[in-house]
Structure formats: C-alpha cells, structure tokens
C-alpha cells in the first residue's frame, strides 16, 4: 500500500516537472513572436487552436464507447477552457509584452495563493500551518519581484494582465484536480478546444486584437522562421504541457500541484535567458527563490496533515461535483 502511494506521488511529481518545463518554454517563444509584430491574442489563439487540433481527435477516440457520459463533462471542461486556457494564456502573453518573462510568470503564480484560499473557503477546513507559511513566502517573494519600494516599478498594465493570468492558473489547478469521468488526455483536449473557441470569438468580435507579424523571428541570437516558434508553442508548450499538467494534478491534488508547478518559473527564466538573453534583476531573482521556498513548506505541511487525518485528503482538494 505504502509503495503504491509512493509510486502514485512519484508519477505525479514527474508529470508536473515535465509539464512545468514545457510550459516554461511558452514565454520566450511567444515574446519572440510578439517582438516580430505578432499580437499576444494572435499568438495564443494559434497556440491553443493548434494544440486542440492535435489532441481532440485522440481525446474523442479515447471515449468513443462512452461518449454520452463524456459529454456530461462539457460544463466542467468549458469552465476549464475559459479559465485555465483562455484567461491564463492570454493574460500571461499580454503581460509578457510589457514585462520580462520571469516577472510576468511570477505574478501569474500568485494564483497559488488563490488556490489555497479558495479551497479553504469551500471545504471550510484550514490547511496545515506550514501551507500557510508557504503562502506567506510566496507573497514576500512576490513583493521582492515587483519591487514594492518603488525603485523600478513594473508596468502596471502588465501587472494587471498578470493578475488575470493568476486567476486562470488557480482555475487550472482547482479544476484539473476534480474527479471526472474523462481521461487526462481527453480532459485536456476538451479544455483546449473550449479555450480556442472563446479566444476565436473574442478575436472575431474585435475585443482582442489579432494581427499576424513577420515571417521570421529572433531565437537565441539567430533568425528563424516564425513557424518554428509557433510549432514549439503548439506541440510542446500547449499539447504536451496541458496533458502532463492535468495528469500530475490528478495524482497530487490541487494545492500540492500548484506549488510543485512553481518550478515553471525556474524553467521559464532559464529558457528566457537562452532564447532571448533576458534575465531578471538581482532582487527579482531573490524573490523567485523565496517564492519557490514555499514548495518545500507546503510539501512538509501536506505530509504532516496526511498523518494527522489519514482518511481525509491531504492536499485539500475541492469536493467532488454533484452528479
């Protein structure tokens, strides 16, 4: 039994780490396109629609013999698509247009605080005190990243877009961890399809500017076709990242998954350095380290909570939806 639990957690951790690395590539490649004249809305629409086209046929094939029960999950996957796909990705890419990749992503990860607070409010069960320490560390690190003393205040519009991304990220971890009849692959495919439809409607209505830029972009100091960056965003940063992210969240639960997912910041900063030659300032790097320290705190807290309440969910997941 213990060995099975360890294997379960191990699969979740590996899936989330790989997902974080895949997600971490999105900012640098998207910013390369934005700097070449592409609007954030156009970049995110191509990314999400392309990933949906790749995943949806396989996702439908997986549930071909139980299509009716799968269709009952459409409200959940549509909500996931609106929050975790459309809001999170559009907000992040809009923030990347005005901020460095690392700073934009750290603001987005304020969503981990929203996860803890939302689950606490809905379950009425307070998380372990070490989980609270992790939240405090995240807020302190965020203050360092944003430089609240005012020495180099970031673009406030970019911060606002990053906040929208934070709300979307919270939706990703909360909704991806909910019990559902859909396999992880199909859930991600349905969510991406819903997000693509929402983004397309916003673009057609003129709410979000859609402009396609130059045919070539700068990657790692060299000129490359724009389709290379778009292909990376579709296959790696969307299709692979979302499938592994949903799988990992189901193994670890919403709270722990949201903290492990913070490693995306490290990957994003590394990729931004390699691809764009972009690196946050010293205090922003310190803030990033402080935020990531919350991962260790919440992990210890979750394990202690599991020992104290062995029959309860140790990661404070939301209750199952009513059938």
Image (cartoon, rainbow, N blue to C red):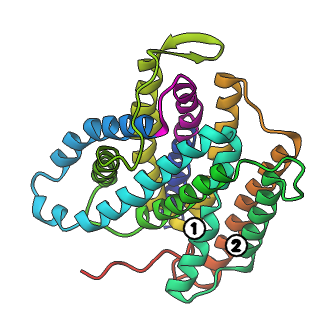
Q: Quadrant of the C terminus?
A: bottom left
Residue located at (53% from left, 36% from top): 26
Where 293 sits versus 20, above or below?
Answer: below
The residue carrying mark 1 is: 255
Q: Residue 117 location, x and y as percent?
A: 60, 77
Marks 1/2: CA–CA distance: 9 Å
- Given residues 119 and 316, the one toward you in this image is 119
Q: Are marks 1 and 2 in contact (CB under 8 Å)?
A: yes
Residue at 76% x, 58% y: name it.
Answer: 142
Q: Residue at x 53, y 22 (%)?
A: 36
| Sequence-first tag of 1 and 2 | 2
To which quarter of the image does residue 300 belong?
bottom right
Q: Residues within 10 Å of mark 1 (few under 14, many from 20)?
A: many
Viewer can see residue 127:
yes
Q: Residue 196 magenta-drawn? A: no
Disc 2 is placed on an element classified as helix
Q: Residues within 10 Å of mark 2 (few under 14, many from 20)?
A: many
Q: How many marks?
A: 2
Answer with left or right where residue 22 lies relative to residue 142: left
Q: Position of residue 65 (x, y in %)?
A: 9, 55
Residue 24 inside the magenta-drawn segment: yes
- State whether the magenta stretch is mostly helix, strand or loop: helix
**Is label 1 in a helix, a strand or a loop?**
helix
- Percent position (x, y) of residue 63? 17, 53
Q: Is residue 170 left or right of residue 52?
A: right
Magenta residues (range): 22-40
């Amino acid at each position: 039994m213990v060995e099975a639990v360890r294997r379960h957690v191990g699969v979740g951790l590996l899936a989330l780490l790989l997902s974080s690395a895949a997600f971490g590539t999105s900012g640098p490649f998207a910013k390369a396109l934005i700097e070449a004249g592409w609007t954030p809305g156009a970049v995110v629409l191509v990314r999400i629609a392309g990933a949906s086209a790749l995943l949806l046929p396989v996702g439908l094939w997986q549930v071909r013999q139980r299509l009716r029960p799968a269709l009952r999950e459409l409200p959940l996957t549509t909500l996931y698509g609106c929050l975790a796909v459309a809001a999170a990705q559009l907000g992040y890419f809009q923030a990347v247009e005005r901020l460095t990749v690392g700073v934009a992503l750290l603001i987005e990860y304020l969503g981990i605080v929203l996860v803890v607070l939302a689950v606490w409010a809905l379950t009425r069960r307070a998380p372990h005190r070490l989980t609270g320490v992790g939240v405090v560390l995240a807020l302190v690190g965020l203050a360092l990243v944003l430089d609240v003393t005012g020495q180099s205040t970031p673009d406030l519009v970019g911060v606002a877009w990053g906040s929208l991304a934070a709300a979307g990220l919270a939706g990703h971890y909360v909704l991806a961890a909910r019990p559902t009849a859909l396999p992880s692959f199909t859930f991600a495919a349905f969510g991406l399809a819903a997000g693509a439809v929402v983004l397309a409607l916003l673009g057609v209505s003129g709410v979000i500017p859609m402009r396609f830029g130059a045919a070539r972009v700068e990657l790692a100091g060299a000129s490359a076709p724009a389709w290379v960056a778009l292909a990376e965003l579709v296959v790696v940063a969307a299709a692979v990242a979302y499938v592994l992210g949903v799988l990992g969240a189901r193994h670890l639960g919403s709270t722990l998954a949201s903290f492990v997912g913070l490693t995306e910041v490290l990957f994003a900063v590394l990729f931004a350095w390699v691809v764009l030659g972009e690196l946050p300032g010293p205090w922003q790097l310190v803030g990033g380290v402080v935020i990531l320290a919350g991962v260790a705190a919440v992990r210890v807290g979750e394990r202690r909570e599991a020992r104290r309440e062995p029959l309860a969910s140790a990661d404070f997941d939301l209750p199952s939806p009513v059938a």
